[in-house]
Amino acid sequence: MSCHKSYITTPIYYVNDVAHIGHAYTTIIADTLARYSRLIGEDTFFLTGTDEHGQKIEEAAKKRGKETQAYADEISKTFKDLWDDFDISYDKFIRTTDADHKLGVQKAFTAMHKKGDIYKDTYSGHYCISCETFFPETQLVDDEFCPDCGKSTSIVEEESYFFKLSAYEDKLLAWYENNPDCILPKSKRNEVIRFVEGGLNDLSITRTSFDWGVKLPADFNDPKHVMYVWLDALMNYVTALGYGTDDANMDNWPARVHLIGKDILRFHAIYWPAFLMSLDLPLPKHIGAHGWWTRNGEKMSKSKGNVVDPKEVADAYGLENFRYFMLREVPFGGDGDFSQRALMDRINSDLGNDLGNLLNRLIGMSGKYFEGRVECDLVSKYYQAELDEMETSLVKLEPMISELQLHRFLEELWRPLTVANRAIDKYQPWTMIKEGKTEETMALNGLIATILAKVSLMLHAVMPATTTTVCNALGFEITPQTFQNILKDGGILAPFVTEKREPLFPRIEAELLVDARLEALKKEQEEADAKKEAEKKAKKEAKKAGNASTGLASTDGVALIGIDQFFATSLKVGTVVKAEEVPKSKKLLLLQVDVGEAETRQVVAGIKEWYSAEEMLNTQVCVVANLKPAKLMGMLSQGMLLAAKDENGLCMVRPEKAKTNGTPIG
Ligand code: MSP
């Protein structure tokens, strides 16, 4: 058995909001790898935690009227509680507000400075708060919006310390070149190489525009600077091992794999190795970037309001079924759309029919023919071909795990189950027993038990509790020793006696989550589909009508809508009860609009060029009241104001006479 060190990490999660299934996905992959690594006898250290500094967190706390640290404590706890609830086998949960982490980051800053990799300058650029990143003007969308998340950026000019990232271009390229599997899946490595070949700018690594971050080391005597969150956050992978303080677990470094989502690949595959080179530390062996979980094709994110709560799914469908589903359903690196249908199909088919049913068949047949006894010593005498087929699959598994191809791993792992199920249909034990072929029948049961045992051992890291139940039913415990003995050394299962038991995967007939939010999402999707359909139809009809009368498309290219579609928009009269400017924005005003029935809506309106906040205050406006909420510059906007704009500027559309707030327009 090997004693390799195996250090596995998840990203540390931002505490601006609670976890969704995207976060659970990263953590479940990492947990699976950590469990597997322990099972094969590796000395494993598994790290997860929370990323708590930066403007985004500061603002999230402010918005909820909470003190930043208290807010970070609260959300960090929800992550920890969720992982505990999910039985995630982490060895350490780090928080970037931990005192020793902060010390470690400061030590790193000093070390990089000593190395000559840090200098001070001024920076002026377009900054996206949501991504905590500066973008060059050329990368902005429509001169304003963030190329990554689409939100509005703001111009920030500040004094900043810079890291000489440009000096590491060649070294980074050499690292990618010499380590073909440093970034997985391999296709992602090419993207990174192309990016670096395009040239790297030095990286601004401190901020003065806010306060919530790790301060510079005292001897820099520059108290207005705090560290850039990504420098702070990436360092967690080594401060968690004691870097910069007691070095207690630094022998685990370098990491075997940093598990991340593809949106944060650049930080991990470019900045992080450059920082490590500057610190003279070895580089991680692999960076594994998975794809996104989407809903109806859109990335799941709290700001879009389309998140699925992992706890709700796990509670309804079973935690381990959910784990299996997530890993099996999408190729590592690709995106996957979450649907209850797909989850149910996996449970009923793969888990219920293929795995659970096989155990039931074994229990049934051994009970009926042999009073529950199962013996495996004669399997190879009668079923060598089946054993060979099983082995062919089993030997393929390990490389798939190393390459993080967990969907292919599970697919391949299911083949032996098919071999077993097919063998029952082919040899028909019920006929064999009648023909007096007792030995062959016992050996067939032995074959099934052997396959179930080996599959369960390999599946253990994905479904720990379920496979424990299966192996206990087969008379043994799952340990690194039994793993080695049964899977690697060709050990034969000791005779055991089966007992009747409840099915492992009761069939699920209908979607189990009737959670109001999910229902609302479903309804929203149905409505969106219906709308699309109606638009299509309207367009078709318009075209027909236009063609019939003039031979041209009608209405100046504007699609015709039916009256139903018009009434689907809820327009109301409202009064602006509070109006203020949005700092750093040339275009936006932040308005609170009374829309009747004691409801006040926050509306972020792009009207500042034409109206001041005072001018808007206490005036009546027309509000589109059933728009999906959106975020502009990090602020929630729960509606839109009607306005008319021509070459002379913009004016608000208002009721001609004062109307009660909430009066419908139409
Ligand atoms: N704090 C940074 C990571 C710093 S690591 C030094 C961060 N946090 S995050 O909370 O926004 O995201 C954490 C992880 O969740 C990322 O790997 C991200 O890719 C993943 N996911 C967030 N939304 C996701 C989906 N919709 N689907 C799958 N994973 C996604 O980034």
Image: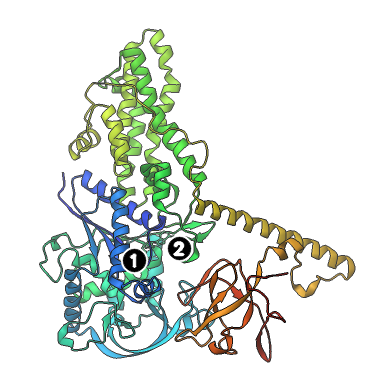
Which residue is at 25% across, 88% downward?
119
Q: Pick whichever of labels 1 and 2 is earlier in the sequence.
A: 1
Q: Nearer the viewer, residue 393 or 482?
A: 482
Which residue is at 26% across, 87% downward?
224
Query: Could you say which quadrant of the image residue 130 lies in?
Result: bottom left
Q: Secondary structure at mark 2?
A: loop
In the picture, measured across the screen, residue 644 lies left or right of residue 408, that is right
If the image is split into quadrants, where does the C terminus sit?
A: bottom right
Q: How far from the left and from the top, in percent, is residue 531?
A: 67, 59
Residue 566 seen = yes
Instruction: Return the mark for residue 15.
Output: 1
Residue holding disc 2 = 301
Q: How far from the left and from the top, in percent, is residue 212?
A: 29, 77
Q: Nearer the viewer, residue 459 or 132?
A: 132
Q: Is the residue marked 2 within 8 Å of ligand 1, measured from its CB?
A: yes
Looking at numbered disc 2 in the image, what kind of residue is underneath it? Ser
Query: Could you say which quadrant of the image residue 250 lies in?
Result: bottom left
Q: How far from the left and from the top, in percent, is residue 266?
A: 36, 70
Above-or-below relation of 616 to 440: below
Q: Secondary structure at mark 1?
A: loop
